[in-house]
Image (spheres, helix red, strand yellow):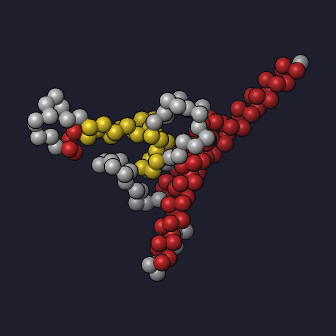
C-alpha cells in the first residue's frame, strides 16, 4: 500500500503544479493587457515581446522564450535570409523572418516557472512606467 500512497501523493503534486501553471497563465495574460503599448523586442522588426528569464528551467532544448502581447509564452525564432547570392541588393525587411513558436510541449512545472519569471518581468516594466508617469506629473496607472 505504500506504493499506492506514493503514487497518490505524486498525482496530487502534479495537479497542484498544473493548477498553479493555469493561474499564472491568467495573471500573465492580465499583466500583458495592462502593458500597453507593448515593448518591441530588441533587434526585431515585427515582434513586440519581452524576453523571459530561463532561470529555474531545466530544458536545454529551448531557445529565446518571450511573452508576447497576448500574454502567452513563445519561443522566438529570428532568421535573416539573404538568398542565394550575396551580390544582390536585399531588402532587410523582406529578408527577415521572425516567428513566435507556441510552447505546446512544456511540462506544467516548467510552464509555471517561466510564467512566474515572465510575470515578474512584466510587473517590473509596469512599475517602471508608473514611476516614469509620476515623475512627469501624470497619474500612475491603476
Return the x and y of residue 58 as percentages of the image width and height: 59, 33
Return the x and y of residue 124 as percentages of the image width and height: 54, 60
Instruction: Judge from the rendering whether residue 97 lies leftward or rightward of residue 106; answer left or right.
Output: left
Count of numbered tags:
0
Residue furthest to the left:
88
Identify which residue is drawn at 10% across, 36% down.
88
Return the x and y of residue 10 as percentages of the image width and height: 76, 28
Q: Is residue 8 visible?
A: yes
Identify which residue is drawn at 46% across, 81% down.
137
Residue furthest to the front:
87
User: Can you say which quadrant of the picture contains the C terminus?
Assistant: bottom right
Q: Is residue 70 visible?
A: no
Identify which residue is drawn at 33% across, 49% down.
43
Instruction: Judge from the rendering whether residue 112 lies leftward or rightward of residue 36; answer left or right.
Output: right
Q: Is residue 13 above or below residue 119?
A: above
Instruction: Judge from the rendering whether residue 30 lies leftward or rightward of residue 95; answer left or right.
Output: right
Residue furthest to the bottom:
137
Q: Nearer the viewer, residue 54 or 131?
A: 54
Q: Nearer the viewer, residue 20 or 122?
A: 122
Instruction: Judge from the rendering whether residue 98 lies leftward or rightward of residue 15; answer left or right.
Output: left
Identify which residue is drawn at 47% across, 41% down.
65
User: Can you say which quadrant of the picture contains the N terminus?
Assistant: top right
Amino acid at each position: 500500500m505504500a506504493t499506492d500512497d506514493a503514487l497518490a501523493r505524486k498525482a496530487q503534486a502534479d495537479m497542484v503544479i498544473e493548477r498553479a501553471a493555469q493561474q499564472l497563465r491568467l495573471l500573465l495574460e492580465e499583466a500583458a493587457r495592462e502593458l500597453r503599448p507593448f515593448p518591441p523586442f530588441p533587434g526585431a522588426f515585427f515582434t513586440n515581446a519581452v524576453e523571459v528569464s530561463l532561470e529555474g528551467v531545466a530544458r536545454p532544448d529551448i531557445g529565446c522564450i518571450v511573452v508576447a502581447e497576448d500574454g502567452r509564452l513563445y519561443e522566438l525564432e529570428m532568421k535573416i535570409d539573404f538568398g542565394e547570392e550575396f551580390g544582390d541588393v536585399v531588402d532587410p525587411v523582406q529578408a527577415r523572418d521572425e516567428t513566435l513558436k507556441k510552447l505546446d510541449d512544456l511540462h506544467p512545472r516548467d510552464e509555471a516557472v517561466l510564467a512566474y519569471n515572465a510575470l515578474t518581468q512584466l510587473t517590473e516594466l509596469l512599475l517602471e512606467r508608473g514611476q516614469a508617469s509620476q515623475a512627469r506629473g501624470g497619474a500612475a496607472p491603476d
